[in-house]
Image (spheres, grey):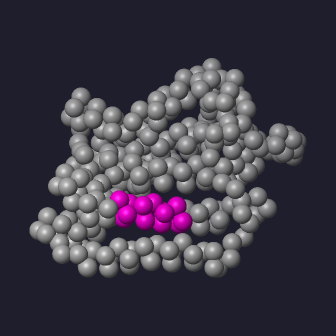
Amino acid sequence: MSLTTDSQTDTVDPRATTAPHEGKRTLASYLLMPIFLVVVLVVLYLYIKSQDLDTIEARSLNAKTISTAVLQHIGLTAVSTVFVLIIAIPLGVVLTRQWTRSFRGALITIANIGQATPTIGLLALMSVVWYMIGFKAAIIALVAYAVLPVLRNTMVGIEQVDKTVLEAGRGMGMSRGGVLARLELPLAVPVILAGVRTALVVNVGTATLAAYIGAGGLGKIIVAGLSTNRILVTITGAALTAVLALLIDYLAGIVEDVLRPKGL
């Protein structure tokens, strides 16, 4: 089932990302992922230290280069995700209103195009056709690619709210805005947050491609390793990207636990 037509948007989309609620986690479960990531980083550091690095490897794997790449990668991920939230959540709310039925399918199709188009293709188009390179071009591509999961989950989250609950709210004298703010959005929060979590992880991965248009990030280390045939450099860049993605997903999971309404 797809969210590409009007009739299809009237039902819950099974593709929407919904995080299973695992109940209240223990302190040990919260500490497991950070410990695992630290172990991975320590092993990676010790392995690099044990190698005799040539000048190219030493230039790509020094602390300053890596820390700069990590900060650039976090910046690309954070800024693009903020824009995704600003665009996708309000748009998702609007598209669940009855008065948007006539053009709902067209807007969702546009959002689908953004995700269906390969990110590297978007980057190439902006750099070749519109002469855009660097940070801004990368943000546009990342937003276009990640907006759909949040948009889709916002719509699904709101549409799956029990209609009898909404009718009870209206029966208590709530306005449409009150029903949206006090019933629909709070009850849709778990599904919306699952979409945000997906968008964050997607952005961490696709941000590696931003190196091809001069936006920096951990992709720059990976590209340097591939272009100079240095496997150690490539593995380090890939491993740091994976660690960052797992860390961000872990932190997003904590935020989700905090913001999830009690009882859901």
Q: Can the viewer see residue 9 in this picture?
A: yes
Q: Eyeballing the image, is 264 above or below 146? A: below
Residue name at image x 46 percent, y 72 percent: 37
Residue name at image x 59 percent, y 26 percent: 4
Name the foreground residue: 144 vs 50: 50
Name the foreground residue: 196 vs 208: 208
Query: Where does residue 114 sit, x and y in percent of width and height?
Result: 44, 34
In this view, the residue farthest toward the top is: 102
The secondary structure that most of the magenta stretch takes on is helix
Residue name at image x 23 percent, y 75 percent: 51
Which quadrant would residue 228 be assigned to in this image?
bottom left
> Which region of the structure is painted magenta?
238-251
Query: Where does residue 112 sit, x and y in percent of width and height?
Result: 51, 31
Q: Can the viewer see residue 181 in this picture?
A: no
Query: Where does residue 52 sit, x and y in percent of width and height?
Result: 18, 75
Q: Quadrant of the C terminus?
A: bottom right
Q: Is 20 situated left or right of 171 in this image?
A: left
Residue name at image x 74 percent, y 66 percent: 23
Query: Where does residue 172 sit, x and y in percent of width and height?
Result: 87, 46
Which quadrant would residue 30 be assigned to in this image?
bottom right
Q: Is 183 situated left or right of 39 in this image?
A: right
Q: In which quarter of the image is the N terminus?
A: top right
Q: Does the magenta stretch include residue 73?
A: no
Q: How many marks?
A: 0
In this view, the residue farthest toward the left is: 55
Q: Is 234 situated left or right of 171 in this image?
A: left
